[in-house]
Image: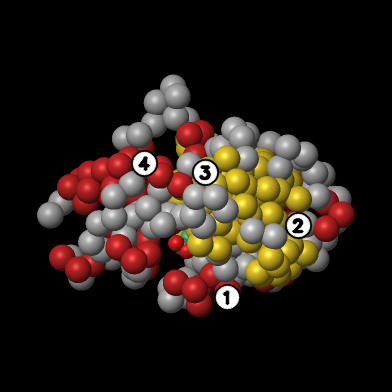
Amino acid sequence: MSLFLYAEKVAHAQANHKAIEKITVTNPKMTVEEAYEVQKISIEQTLSAENRFIGWKMGLTSVAKQKQVGVEEPIYGRLTSQMNLQTNELIAAEHIHPRVEAEVAFVFNKELKGANLTPLEIWPAIENVFLALEVIDSRYENFSFTLPDVVADNASSSKILLSSQAFSPYEKNWADVKVKLYHNGEEKLEGTGAAVLGHPINSVIQLLNMLEKEGRGILPGQLVLTGGITDAIHVAAGDEVVADYGDLGSLTLNVK
Ligand code: OOG
Ligand code: MG
């Protein structure tokens, strides 16, 4: 099967929220590079005036997340404007088996490109920091995949809820930000920003290292999700998830 046909298959599952068999069942030799090509083709075909490309997400940047899905390498995915929730409601019926995780997100005001940039080169390009809940929803049966599968499926990207308040990048040391995740009022998980590759800024360095291989970088105005701090919580209709970031505030997602 050509990469275009795999891209069609993945795009169809994303649009119709129907689980599919892992690509590597029929194509065990698919490489990670080919999988990024499938991701690119499938997401770029959804872009339009109503669904703009808005940035990148990093995934599997914390040990908690790597252990949860059994893939131990950071990956990236593409974010589009239709993923960005405008209210704190998630429609369960528009998903297969959604999970929610707490993250830190950056918005950039300058172009960044190149391998092995230093934090000192990156901070001045960050306009704002947002607290974020990411909804992931693997398009594969049983939320089970290998590295090429999850890369092809746009790193399980589904929806994003950003805090309405934007923070200065210098507001605090983002390695120290603490988050507690509550599921229907019960505290389930907690973690700190340091869980993300030691510091969420390292996720941006790693993203740029990977994008450099595609000859790409981060453009002004783009958003980057740095990756789940804790593992993700499975949700269903009727659920409420609260991410409490202490003195920075909290985010609530209601699943309908
Ligand atoms: C892959 C996406 C992981 C994160 O923040 O680590 C991710 C998955 O768990 O399905 O978004
Ligand atoms: Mg994530």
* 219, above or below 26, in the image: above
Q: Name the residue under label 1.
A: 63
Q: What residue type is labelled 1?
A: Val
Task: Give how far apart the Cα atoms at labels 3 and 1 are.
Answer: 30 Å
Task: Give how far apart the Cα atoms at labels 3 and 4 are.
Answer: 26 Å
How many numbered marks, from 0 up?
4
User: Closer to the N terminus: mark 1 or mark 4?
Assistant: 4
Q: Bin the neighbour count of mark 4 within 10 Å (Cα to Cα): few under 14, some 14-19, many 20 and up.
A: many
Q: Mark 4 points at which residue?
A: 43
The one nearer the camera, 215 or 62, is 62
Q: Bin the neighbour count of mark 1 within 10 Å (Cα to Cα): few under 14, some 14-19, many 20 and up.
A: some
Q: Which amino acid does label 3 sit on?
A: Lys
Task: Give how far apart the Cα atoms at labels 3 and 2 are.
Answer: 21 Å
Say what secondary structure mark 1 lies in.
helix
The one nearer the camera, 168 or 68, is 68
Q: Which of marks 4 and 2 is in front?
A: 2
Task: Give how far apart the Cα atoms at labels 2 and 1 are.
Answer: 21 Å
**Which residue shows up at 81% across the image and 50% down it?**
249
Dividing the picture into quadrants, the one containing residue 85 is: top right
The one nearer the camera, 213 or 230, is 230
Q: Bin the neighbour count of mark 3 within 10 Å (Cα to Cα): few under 14, some 14-19, many 20 and up.
A: few
Q: Name the residue under label 2.
A: 244
Mark 2–mark 1 contact, CB under 8 Å? no
Q: Bin the neighbour count of mark 2 within 10 Å (Cα to Cα): few under 14, some 14-19, many 20 and up.
A: many
Rendered location of residue 57, percent (x, y): 53, 51
